[in-house]
Image (cartoon, rainbow, N blue to C red):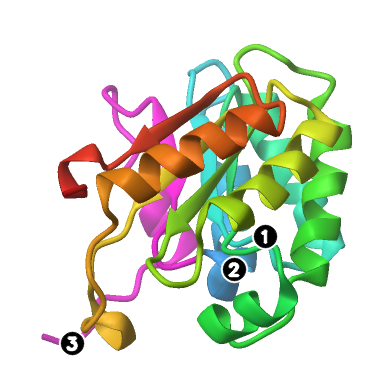
Amino acid sequence: ESPQWRSVEELVEKVNSETSCICFFGGDPIPQLPYAIRVSEQVRETYPDKIIRICWETNGSMHPGWLKRVFRLSMESGGCVKVDLKAWHPNIHRALCGFHNRLILDNFRRLAQMAAARKEPPVLLASTLLVPGYVDDSEVYQLASFIAALDPDIPYALLGFAPQFCLEDFPTTSLAQAEACLDAAKRAGLRRVRIGNRHLLH
C-alpha cells in the first residue's frame, strides 16, 4: 500500500472535539521535524482556547535550534518531551545507533535547564531500552548519574527489549537484568524511576 501524504492543513483539520494531545513518536520525528513543528504551531493557532498538549518521543539528536522550538511547544501546551537515551558509553551508542552520543547528551542538558521552569507536570522525561548484552546495570548507572546530576526528579523509564529488525536474534530483557538496572538507577540518585514493558520480561 502506497503512503498517504498529508499537507499541514489536512492534518490540522483532523483535530476534533476529542483531541486533547498530539504525540510525535516512533520512529523518530526528527526526519520530519519542520513538518511536525508547523503542524503543532498551526494547531495551536487554530484552536487557541482548546487544551491540546504537544508531546514528543525522540533520540534527542536534532540541532539545538530545533530543540528549542520543540521544547517551547510542549512547555506552552502542557505536553512533554521524552528523550530515549540509548547508551552512556560512545562505543556502545555507536554499536546500537551508528553514531556518537555527544550531541544527544548536550541536548539533554539543555532540555533539563529549560525544564526547570515547569516541575509539574514534568516537561522532560527520559527512557532507556535495556538491550541484552549492551545496556546493563553499569551502563544504566552512568546514564542515571548523568540525569540525577541535572535533576534527580526527572522521570526515568527502563524499557524491556523485544527482539526485532537488526536485533531479531537477541533475547528479550530478563527480569533479573531489569531489576538490577532499576536498583542501579536508584543508587545513582534518581527518585522517579520505573520499569516499563513489564509484560516483555522473563
Tell me whether circle 3 and circle 2 mark residues in contact (CB < 8 Å): no
Which one is nearer the viewer's eye here, 81 or 126?
A: 126
**Residue nearer the viewer, 32 or 85:** 85
Residue found farthest to the top: 120
Q: What element carries label 1?
A: loop
Q: In which quarter of the image is residue 173?
A: bottom left
Is residue 39 in the magenta section? no
Q: Name the residue under label 1.
A: 60
* Residue at mark 3: 2
Magenta residues span 1-28
Q: Residue placed at 52% from the left, 39% from the top?
A: 55
Residue 41 percent across, percent down from the top left:
63, 44
Residue 38 point in image, percent of width and height: 61, 56
Q: In this view, does 138 lie to the left or right of 172?
A: right
Question: For mark 2, what is the residue?
Answer: 30
* Residue that appears at 82% across and 70% down: 102
